[in-house]
Image: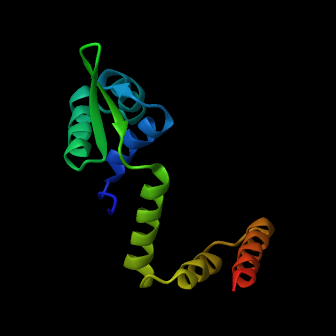
Amino acid sequence: MASPRISAAESRIMEALWARSPQSADEIVALVGAAQNWGEATVKTLINRLLKKKALASERTAGRAAYRPLVSRPDYVTGESQGLLDRLFGGELAPLVAHYARHRPLSPQEVAELKRLIQELDDED
């Protein structure tokens, strides 16, 4: 099953829950709301959107709702990365790397890492 589309604002809620879960709405408001300058209503709206998208689950504990992610961070990152490749580079990885190499100098460590990854892929063939 494909991961649901998570907006940039919703991803702030998810990041908090990937770091520690379950958390109550009040805990999420205290953590994310303050950092983003969002009020309680904004955070709760984002939580409700994520519940509707089935990105979060709600569990009752001691009479309070506690939230936990249903989408793993690695699955989210994979979906977002593929979406970026599809939208901007026709699904191709090489043009993405070429774009960054032309517009932002690669450090020697980045070049070495890319070479290592390419060598690993060659070794798998």
Quadrant occupied by the C terminus = bottom right
Q: Quadrant of residue 38?
A: top left
Q: Residue at x 31, y 53 (%)?
A: 7
Q: Residue at x 20, y 37 (%)?
A: 45
Q: Give the percent coordinates (x, y) of residue 95.
A: 54, 84
Q: Quadrant of residue 33?
A: top left
State the scheme by which the image is colored.
Answer: rainbow
Asked if residue 1 is positioned above or below residue 12 in the image, the reply reads below
Q: Residue at x 54, y 79 (%)?
A: 96
Q: Give the percent coordinates (x, y) of residue 34.
A: 39, 28
Asked if residue 57 is positioned above or below residue 106 in the image, the reply reads above
Q: Quadrant of residue 118?
A: bottom right
Please give the count of numbered marks on the rendered protein. 0
Asked if residue 68 is positioned above or below residue 52 in the image, the reply reads above
Asked if residue 3 is positioned above or below residue 66 in the image, the reply reads below
Q: Is residue 92 left or right of residue 100?
A: left
Q: Is residue 95 left or right of residue 84?
A: right
Quadrant occupied by the N terminus = bottom left
Question: Which residue appears farthest toward the top when viewing the image?
Answer: 62
Is residue 39 visible in this depiction of the protein?
A: no
Q: Give the percent coordinates (x, y) of residue 83.
A: 39, 70
Q: Is residue 97 left or right of residue 82?
A: right
Is residue 72 visible in this depiction of the protein?
A: yes
Q: Residue at x 73, y 68 (%)?
A: 110
Q: Give the percent coordinates (x, y) of residue 46.
A: 25, 40
